[in-house]
Image (cartoon, rainbow, N blue to C red):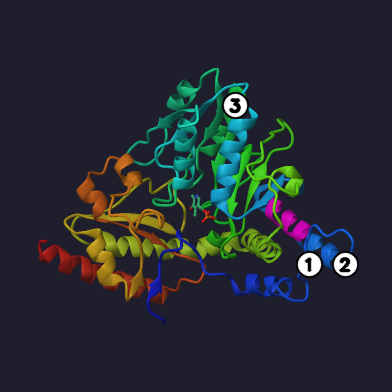
Amino acid sequence: MKLPVYLDHNATTPCDPRVVEAMLPYFTERFGNAASRTHAFGWQAEEAVENAREQVAALIGAGPREIVFTSGATEAVNLAIKGVFDRYASRGNHIITVKTEHKAVIDTCKHLERSGGEVSWLPVDSEGLIDLSELEAAIRPTTILICVMLANNEIGVIQPVREIGEIARRKGVAFFSDATQAVGKLPVDVQADGIDLLALSAHKIYGPKGAGALYVRRRDPRISLTAQMDGGGHERGMRSGTLNVPGIVGLGKACALCEKEMEADRVRIEPMRDRLEQGLLRLDGAKVNGSRIHRLPATTNMSFAGIDGEALLAALAKDVALSSGSACTSASPEPSYVLKALGLDDELAYASLRIGLGRFTTDEEVGYAIERVSETVQRLQRQPS
Ligand SMILES: *Cc1c(COP(=O)(O)O)cnc(C)c1O
């Protein structure tokens, strides 16, 4: 067993070696620009991109022409929200979202609030779930977008997207879901779930960093977007810029592997997550944050009353790689806004740990993590700060 044990898969995942293998030729002999129409180098690259487009689409029940490649989920989120805001400006300026969204969504919506947009921020209950009647009541004649993530990156809680999709459809409002943590880990189907726009990222599903995609529904109803990046008109004008061919090939391969292996991964990883959680729940003052039913199979978020989470993470860093929340906010000493939205006070929010297992996590690593986290929590609880 190699140390430190990596249990921060919600921040990023290692590339699957099969993904790397698929990407390698596209750095060297197949280096062409997918937009080059005049020679075989370009044709080869374009064929690889179109193959990846089909692999991504297949994983979420979309058509290949509904996939726009981006640099990752943050860009996909920006394109979805700002693209709808600009395109549908004549219809309205109101967006509905949730307090526990990823920073990519929160900061994009805050940006629009400063540019004439109106945003309703839905609360969540102590389980981390939104109230569907509150969502419906928030819809106004000027509402142009409902933006609710599929699975939360800090607590793994899964929102009732199918019901949200139904409400959005009935009210004639577009529905965007940041599915970055859900895609590849649980079945996602944009048709059945009534999703009109969906963001995903390669590096959360054993693909490379710097590649992602936005799904944009083409019919029933057709969604159009104002591009946020102008240039050569790549990606049907929605996202200009030379395509990251190796990254896109890697994203496609990562999606194909998830489609094939998601169920087997879940059946293996979920019991390890449960064992880890059970092991740590034996500690004094330990509790799980968020719904334990509507939750990703490889994630748990736990609080340990009476400890300083930063001290815990620092004490563990050499042995177990963990985080207290999203990677984007863990540099600042602020308590997690997601946990606060669930009703945790600052002290308990500070005393929390996010654990994300992954495809290559072993039973041995889980046993080791239980031991090391338990002894460290107990030591910190004994020595008052
Ligand atoms: C990681 C993550 C993002 C950002 O994805 P990048 O590809 O790193 O930009 C957005 N939303 C959620 C829910 C995430 O987990």
Disc sitting over residue 40 in the figure? 2
Asked whether the viewer can see residue 166, the reply is yes
Residue 130 point in image, percent of width and height: 42, 34
Residue 56 falls within the magenta-colored stretch: yes
Q: Which residue is mark 3?
A: 173
Earlier along the polypeptide chain: callout 3 or callout 2?
2
- Range of the magenta residues? 49-58
CA–CA distance in space, label 1 to label 3: 40 Å
Residue 334 point in image, percent of width and height: 28, 50
Residue situated furthest front in the rendering: 231
Residue situated furthest right in the rendering: 38
Q: Quadrant of residue 258?
A: bottom right
Instruction: Judge depth for marks 3 and 2 and give the one in front.
Output: 2
Q: Nearer the viewer, residue 143 or 92?
A: 92
Asked whether the viewer can see residue 131, the reply is no
Which three-letter amino acid code belongs to the residue tagged 1?
Gly
Crowding around mark 2 (Cα neighbors within 10 Å: few <14, some 14 to 19, many 20+) is few
Which three-letter amino acid code belongs to the residue tagged 2?
Ala
Q: Tell me what residue is drawn at x 43 percent, y 25 percent.
A: 134
Horizontal placement of 305 versus 85: left or right? Answer: left
Q: Do the residues bearing badges 2 and 1 touch, measured as CB atoms within 8 Å? A: yes
Residue 24 falls within the magenta-colored stretch: no
Crowding around mark 1 (Cα neighbors within 10 Å: few <14, some 14 to 19, many 20+) is some
Instruction: Judge depth for marks 1 and 3 and give the one in front.
Output: 1
Q: Do the residues bearing badges 3 and 2 touch, measured as CB atoms within 8 Å? A: no
Crowding around mark 3 (Cα neighbors within 10 Å: few <14, some 14 to 19, many 20+) is many
